[in-house]
Image (tube, rainbow, N blue to C red):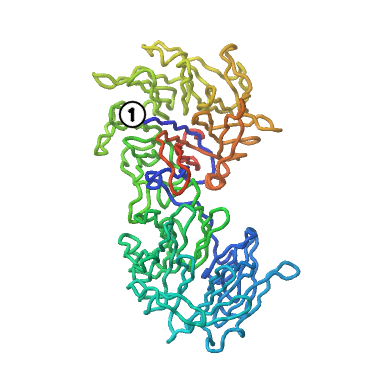
Amino acid sequence: MSPHPFRFRLAGACVLAALAALPGIRAQEEAGRPVFRDFRPTDYRGHPQAFSLVESPEGFLYLGNQEGVIEFDGARWTHLPAPTSLVYRLAFGADGKLWAGGNDEVGYYLPDASGRRVYHSVRHQLPAEMLPFGPAAVVTDGPRTYITGPRGVVQCEDGRFTAWPNPTPGGVSLHRVGGEMLALVAGTGLFRLEPGGRRTLVSDAPAFRGSARTASAPLPDGRVLFVVTHGGAYVFDPRTGTAAPLPGPLDDIARGTRINDALRLPSGEIAVATAAQGLVVLSPDLRRIRRFDRSTGLADNGVISLALDRDGGLWVGFNSGLARLAIDSPVTVFDATNGPTPGTVDAWGRHAGRLYAGTYDGLYRLEPATADGAPARFARISDQVVHIFGFASHRGRLLVAAQAGLYQFDEDDRPELVVDCRANSPFGLLPSPRVPGRFYLPAQSGLVIVEHDATGWHTRADLRTLGDAHTAVLDDEGSLWLGTYNRGFWRLPRADTTADVSTLVPEQFFNGRGLPGNMVWTNVTPGVGGPVFFTDKGQRRFDPQRGAFVPEDRFALPDSAAPLFTPTLVNGTDTWGSLFRDSTIVAASALGRFRADGGKLTWQSAPADALSEIGFSGAAVMWLDDTPAARCCGRAATTTPSASISAGRPPRRARGRR
């Protein structure tokens, strides 16, 4: 384990976010739910069912709904009427027309002189033999618009209408295959639409003789995935005309539920909308799925429609409401649905390849997602060891710093209290990089130093007059720094190069020596160029030549007073943290990093998805995972460590503010 956890609890958003650069299979297996924004019918003031979703070239979202279409500009919802009870399908044409299909009605919207889209019906231009048309769906393909209904298919091009009637009324759906539009007729097969209203059979494979409620998505090699309602999943090869079954979790789901929509994502994954099993996302290799439904935080198990926006967001239309999922974001979230109680995580760590979270109510371990769609989740593996504040790996065993002291867990997750610290409860666990088997435990009354050798575990120092120390950092010289909530900073000079730590003499920095005289609490965390010293009255840097603190000058913002920056952790030449200005309660930026840029450090905020989930008060506990893994999902290969961040309100038994 190479842990870098730092704790700083602020009142704020109750979420736990895992920030990963979408690396490899392990990152996907350990990913939480996507960041999403939910919209209820009371928000858009329309029919609960979101029948169809589409984005305009200008970036507006359109929702097929009751008596017309609802337009969303990112702030306001506007109803655009049409003479039909419900609009079931929407599609933009190459000419900018927004086509809409409803009950016995079809037409398009175009902007008027004011820019507002106005509906124009083409119902009376449809061939007479196709009327009454029934519920209409629309699909566009370049200059052509196709309209489907129980009576068949109608094509509109340059104002001319061509019909392909069904021999008997029944379901029909259109699918783009190999650069052309093919019609799937329920119970019959897959057809090519020829001039003059003729149809040519392309395939009567079993996949195409079932329900017309079939969704499809193209694959990179020219094949097409078909997902058939109550029929399963198939891969169709237009070169051979064969449809091969795709056994696996998606096939199992499709055989048991209705399929409403499918969409290929920029990552190469395929999103599938189901009527009862939520949103299913199929991996690019077609072997694994991820499932998102009410159990993972979505508002509904019934997904009706899908659409992508220009920023890579996936819009999901529910049986009641809709949501935007940041499906391609490097940020995923663990909250009360898949993790510990938000606001209670005080430590992160990885041991034997598994990620652990230490919380107020016990020890949790991340159980990875499975190939059949069960999502990753944190499972509590111990409720005996509580109030956990630190992790380390030592001789193949997991070490846990908790309220009662230092525990060692065996391979069966059984804890053993190896160092009793109930008289000075630990608030952290810092392994020595120089002395094998030595650990520093900042504690409720100061500091505990323990060592493990061939004869067992030993307490080498137990300092109980330093105040409640919640953070500890070793500097380059091996000196140990402690940050307390009521007695300033303490330094134990060259502690990590001293064999007999019982001889150490702590040095206090408080109310003087460059520190603000009215400060209340302090925090010390790592930074590029040495520890970062935070006080609630201003940031400081220690000057070893003066033996005193000076104003921090490493982390600066243009045209702004020096910010408060805490907690922090280091990744190469980057220092991550939360940024504060006029208040230590409300963050100016909930998360970001100072990056080395031409000899100076430049601030870069975290992705907006991370900021929205962490909330106004900034990060509480951060963890940098040094295990690199290659990115996948169609992105350029790279190696990027991942980070985990928790934020939340302090638990009731918190000592001061953590």
Residue 200 image offset from top left, x and y in percent: 42, 78
Rendered view: 581 above or below 424: below
Q: Nearer the viewer, residue 202 or 505?
A: 202
Disc 1 residue type (three-letter): Leu
Could you tell me which residue is drawn at 65 percent across and 29 percent down? 562
Whether 131 is drawn above or below 192: the answer is: below
Q: Is residue 135 above or below residue 527?
A: below
Relative image position of residue 186 (x, y in whole percent): 40, 78
Where 383 sits versus 121, above or below?
Answer: above
- Residue closer to the observer: 278 or 582: 278
Image position, residue 500 (x, y; %): 36, 11
What is the quadrant of residue 359 in the picture? top left
Q: Residue at x 30, y 20 (%)?
A: 458
User: What residue is shown at x 35% (from left), y 54% (from top)?
Assistant: 288
Looking at this view, is 514 or 310 the one in front? Answer: 310
Crowdedness of circle 1 by 10 Å Cα count: few (<14), some, many (20+)? many
Q: How many marks?
A: 1
Expressed as whole percent of the image width and height from the top left, the position of residue 394 reads: 31, 27
Q: Secondary structure at mark 1?
A: strand
Quadrant position of the N terminus in the picture: top left
Residue of label 1: 406
Q: Residue furthest bottom?
A: 128
Rendered image quadrant of residue 360: top left
Q: Residue at x 63, y 76 (%)?
A: 158
